[in-house]
Amino acid sequence: MKINTLSQLSKLREDGAAVCQLRESGIGGGSTAEILVGMATCGVAAGGKQTFAALERALRNRGLSHVRLVKVGCIGSCYCEPTIQVNIPGQEPVFYGNVDEDAAIAIVDSHLLKGNVLESNRLQIGYEKAGLNSKGQKKQQRIALRNCGSVDPENIMDYIAFRGYEALGKVLAEGNPEAVVNSIKASGLRGRGGGGFSTGSKWQATAQQPTGEKYIICNADEGDPGAFMDRSILEGDPHSVLEALAIGGYATGANKGIIYIRAEYPLAIERLKIAIVQAEELGLLGKNILGSGFDFTVELRLGAGAFVCGEETALIHSVEGGRGEPTKKPPFPSISGYLKKPTTVNNVETLANIPPIILNGAGWFSGIGTEKSKGTKVFALVGKINNVGLVEVPMGTTLREIVYEIGGGIRNDRDFRAVQTGGPSGGVITKADLDTPIDYESLKEIGSMMGSGGMIVMDDSDCMVNIAKFYLGFTRDESCGKCTPCRIGTKRMHEILERITNGEGVPEDLVKLERLGNTIKISALCGLGQTAPNPVLSTLKYFQDEYKAHVIDHKCSTGSCKGLLRYRISEEACTGCRACVKVCPVNCIHLANKPAYRIDSAVCTRCGACLAACKFDAVIVE
Amino acid sequence: METVKITINDIELRVPKGRTILEAAKMIDIQIPTLCYLNMEGFHIANQTSSCRVCLVEVVGRAALVPSCSEKVTEGMVIRTDSAKAVAARRMSVELLLSNHPKECLTCQKNLECELQSLAQRLGITDIGFEGEMMNYEIDHSSLSLVKNPNKCIMCRRCETMCNEVQTCGILSAISRGFDAYVGPAFHLDMVDTSCTFCGQCVAVCPTGALTEVNNVRDVVDALNDPSKHVVAQVAPAIRVAIGEMFDMDPGTITTGQLATSLRRLGFDGVFDTDFAADLTILEEASELVHRIKHGGRLPILTSCCPAWVRFFEHQFPDLLDVPSTCKSPQMMMGTIVKTYYAEKLNIDPKDLVVVSIMPCLAKKAEAARMEMDVDSMHNVDLVLSTREFGAMLKEAGTNFAHLPSSDFDSILGESTGAAVIFGTTGGVIEAAVRTAYEWLTGEVLKNVNFEQLRGLEGIRSATVKIGDMDLNIGIAHELGNARKLLEEIRQGKSHYHAIEIMACPGGCIGGGGQPYHHGDMEIIRKRQEAIYREDAGKTKRKSHENQEVLKLYEEYLGEPYGEMAHKLLHTKYTAKDRI
């Protein structure tokens, strides 16, 4: 079947309206109940497949085979996967978390058979969806993630039911590419991959190039440790990215879209492949889309796992089959990109925002957020937080709201220490800045950055020197090695941090770190190198005392830096029972002052076995 | 010309649009240090990777510093090359490079030729603030031509530019990542296991000791010290116009006479000129050309003097092995004649002969060991020194090269014509061949031997030479990327040439991988070329077939050019090789 006109598309949408309503509100949602099962990578990893099978069995055994079981993407509640959503016509949809096989059966028995919600697993989902419905003031607002968890990513009809491809149809019907560019410009949408460059201006730069071979590339090389919003979008709502690429292609004059996706995302790749085939079958990709005369195809290119390939020039070289390494800008890809042709490179989340902007208008979008940062941002909230997962909030939301109201506060009621934003390119935000509204500029001002939206929460058991070392180790490993400051500079900074965390640091090391860091920042070739020192510089700024404790007193207050720990045995408490001697893997505990034993610090590996074995609290860690 | 107004260090100036900051600064004598940057002006070869970060300058209004070697000036740009911020950052780049560089300068082959070393000296770096782990790769001694020491690689990518963009061989590229990154063959292969042609252009541009030639000076000295050996030397045409540079002589100074004297003083028993063999080559090659034309043989014919070129087509065009001439190169012809004709004449057992070549080329080292060339299971040439190695040998001996008296090469393999000396430049071999072919095909005396249309430095040149009533279409290419274009035409059946000359290096042998380092100053190459043609013009005989010693060799020993004996001794065959 081919869709040749906008009205045919509308017809298909109307056919699916009942499903849409059922999932949105339960009101007027037809007559068939359904269960949506979160089957993104996270859901599958948590046992989603088993849950799905258990539900299937339970429904069959209880004569409920008419209840539809639908695989959907991720609703973002990673902390309680697997998650399901039970939609019964005429009733509010109910979300459940931690649905293992037993819970699945219990839900079928209680909710579907008897009509009683299984409260023990019920989830309160606090978000509203983009202009589609409103459930009152909620902290979260879903635009990029609007369909994740609501549509079957492997069924294009689901996407169409949720107004999918309507935005593409609209721009093609209007026939004014320039107006599309202007609209995206007016919306204030900025790159969600980290740079924060105006998406509309990027499109405009490509559009202004003479007509001819042009490209639009979706950057799906999500590589920040702890960030997974792009994966979630691609797994949960792949068509939104395809549609946006086609819109971008139309606006900029490109007939070819390329999705550069890391090979470590097999499920996203599989779903994208299915989505491309389905869109082509319906004629929503390919030749003469919706009878407009506009041709557009999308091709996948797999990345081999280099973080630096997220940098657009490196990405383009990788797509071309070359070494994934950046080149100097200018020239910008908009002028000379893939195959030296004008190329737009947009990140997944950025693209996912495009269709709603087209449908709801630039004014709607620019009404959300702050003065310079419009719309929402998806954050991957991870670390020492109760509700680990994806959250999408309007720009300007404070960190406090995200951590405490949405994230449910720090795990085990420990003290909040800091949040790392911007991944390995960003910096820490401390308690003092918890009330900073989160947008591109404010984060930069406090020495961090938006980045792709990873938010790693740390508590008082995390050593900030160690954390900085971790991030620097990451960028050191991921440096392409092209320019000197990044190739050798990050290595030297990491060596200094290694020394410090091993207890061999000297005060001068801090001066060196700062000098190296500040110089690398201004002298490295690409964004990766220029931002690599940020985690160190920012922790040096906010946690200087902690660094000093490491290099002057040789102490790590959190005990994270094993090299700084000293294990000793209290002569008073030691009974000479030899329990520690028996467990010591390096035989460094010897009889000293009978009956007490002593630990040879030079040999001790700080494994902690003696501490665990001692029944008399004689092993002391300092 | 459109210009833009910029300010550098408070000096306002107008600069043509499209210039880099570095070029603009040079216009007003402002020095900015560079390292990875290399611009072989006039040869369309430039390395602008901006990877070393040694030429960083401050552009007012920008947070990050910019690489002046590649950043183009724009209207109103305000630049500071001397701000503390820029100076400190540049210094740190060099310090970081040094922190990962073996400090064995005293014994490094590049000592005093190393650009990193001179940069450290210029910046006054006496202390490296950031000691730490250093790269520790195995040194690749696998080939007979070049040594690759990854631990001295600074990732400037110059060699990669030469190997990929200029020579289109694609052997060298950046591999591994982060701190472990260096430039080398894929999968860390040994050079000898790749399709490397050993042209040595990577060595010619390497700023450090990461790529150097295999040094055979000690072997030569040992041979000279061995009383049981009769050691003869041959000197390639391009040496005489280049080696003077190593002795503070102006580029383009002709030192033919000094070369002969210096070799004799070093103790060589026979001092011969490869030019003799070049004339011999022309007799064979022109015969082959005439033969192919007269007998409807495969055309075009391609010259085969350049061993890098030979390896290139064996690896890259194994389907076209019947196209090149079967002639051995002059170096190998000379070796063969020394070990047969000369040995017989002097009644020396060829096993006691050691043939040493002084070549502008590193591929000649590998060529000498080619089994296809052997006569009676013996290599024609035993040892090959580059111009640089020979220069070093002279320096070690304390030879006052510039002031040596002139002398002639030894007879019976010492005479040469002007046609032979131009073998040293692009276009020279084919011009020499045409001088002879003309007279052979027409039976007339060629009055003007200067075929100006064949000369120059453009990468690909073509000309039609009228020989009697025949239009001889000639193609010339230097650099293998240009050669590839001509070969693709042949492969596609589109080539209209009768004869094509190929040389692998920029400018031909004058720009060879074994020549004194030009450090990017291509004016040197031009001067060497001028000198080659000057030497030719000064010769009384300028056609190879007028070389009396060569004619005598045929009369006494070889018989007819392109005859049976000549085939046995002076021709070779090619072997299809893999492309890795």
Image (cartoon, coloured by chain):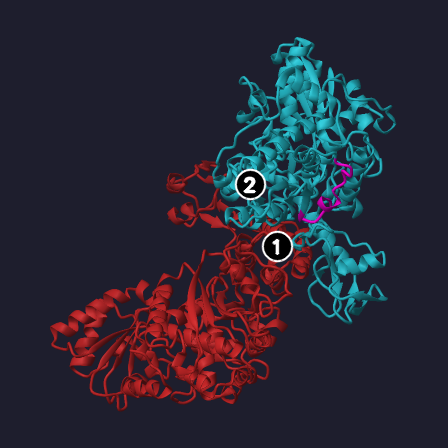
Quarter of the rendering containing residue A438: bottom right
Crowd band around label 2 with a 10 angstrom C-alpha radius: few (<14), some (14–19), many (20+): some
Q: Which of B421 and A472 is in front in this view?
A: B421
Q: Is residue B418 visible?
A: yes
From the image, tell me which residue sits under label 2: B299
Q: Which chain is cyan?
A: B
Q: Which chain is red?
A: A
- Main secondary structure found in the magenta portion: loop
Q: Nearer the viewer, residue B111 or B297?
A: B297
Q: Do labels 1 and 2 share a chain?
A: no
Q: Is residue A107 above or below residue B519?
A: below
Crowd band around label 1 with a 10 angstrom C-alpha radius: few (<14), some (14–19), many (20+): many
Contact flag, marks 1 and 2 (Cβ < 8 Å): no
Left or right placement of residue B431 versus residue B151 in this view: right
Quarter of the rendering containing residue B8: bottom right
- Indicate the chain on which mark 1 is placed: A
> Residue drawn 42% across and 50% down?
A617
From the image, tell me which residue sits under label 1: A486
The percent coordinates of residue A161 (x first, y second) are 32, 83
In the rendered structure, which segment of residues is drawn in magenta?
A: B446-463
